[in-house]
Image (spheres, helix red, strand yellow):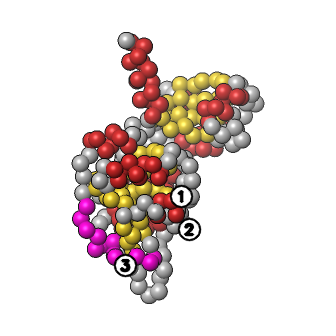
Amino acid sequence: MQDSQDYIDKKAKLAKTLTIYGRNAVNEALIEPTIIPSKLHLSTSNKDAKVIDDMLSICKKRGVEIAYHDKLTLSRISKNAKQDQGVALDIQMDNFINEDEFIANNINYKILAIDGVSNPQNLGMIIRSAAAGNIDAIVIPSKGTSSINPLVIKASVGAIFKIPIIQTNNLEKTLKNFQSNRAKIYTLSLDAKKSYKEIDENNKAIFVLGNETNGVSKEIQSLSDESIIIPMNRGVESLNVAVTASLLAFM
């Protein structure tokens, strides 16, 4: 019985753990006071280096656990053997939430879903606007979108820890899950007839933000219940995706 509970607790903790990698990224994360690191992972193949010594010193001061692994094990932890540089860091993200848990515990909501936003600064600013505005959660895919890294955290100015984040391995599947629970999916399009200010009041709304260049993918666009547009003057055709997020967040 205790073993079963320990397994459940461990699984829950892992679901709220973000692992970043790379020497500069990890060192910056350890220095940043708004980030809560839980474990530093180092490869035993690492050669002596000042940046490694600096990490160890910071971990000692902050009481962060340090673990050593062979190169193969470290690459499994980082999930990026080519770029981890023998270093990975677990960060505690108490605001990571499962989509089914969110659906079960929220009757009405307004969500931003990210579909292919590649610039980490844009993603960080989107998160900051969402946290400051009237957004209840953000859906972030694990593939095809900028990963949550120190650049994203820095651009969010710590707001990334203040709003529920739903991570998904399949954005299309997640959006269908929300739709099956009567959520309405909105996508932005230059060809749309209806202004974002004219949409019908909906108790469960998800606004999808697409790639900076190509917009929302065809797969996600096909799920859209309604396309909307942000009217612009003086021949301006488009806005930065982070600016668009701000307008949606403060509707």
- Image quarter of residue 203: bottom left
Magenta stretch: dominant secondary structure: loop
According to the picture, the residue beneath numbered tag 2 turns out to be 214
Image height of 146 relative to 169, above or below: below
Mark linked to residue 116: 1
Disc 3 element: loop
Q: Dot 1, crowdedness within 10 Å: few (<14), some or many (≥20)?
A: many
Q: What residue type is labelled 3?
A: Lys
Select label 1 or label 3 by which is in front: 3
| Cβ atoms at labels 2 and 1 below 8 Å apart | yes
Question: In the depicted view, which residue is nearer to us: 211 or 36?
Answer: 211
Q: Between residues 165 and 69, which one lies in front from this camera angle? A: 165
In three-dimensional space, the C-alpha distance between marks 2 and 3, rounded to whole angstroms, equals 20 Å
Q: Earlier in the sequence, mark 1 or mark 3?
A: 1
Query: Which badge, 2 or 3, comes first in the chain's sequence?
Result: 3
Do the residues under discs 1 and 3 have CB atoms within 8 angstroms? no
Identity of the residue drawn at 58% across and 25% down: 66
Sequence-first disc among 2 and 1: 1
**Image-quadrant location for residue 34:** top left
Residue name at image x 51 percent, y 44 percent: 169
Compared across the picture, whether 224 is left or right of 91 comes to left
- Name the disc covering residue 193, or none: 3
Amino acid at pointer 2: Asn
Residue 40 on the magenta segment? no
Amino acid at dot 1: Gly
Q: What element carries label 2?
A: loop
The magenta stretch is: 190-202
In the image, 191: left or right of 143? left
Viewer-nearest residue: 132 or 78: 78
Would you say residue 226 is visible in this rendering? Answer: yes
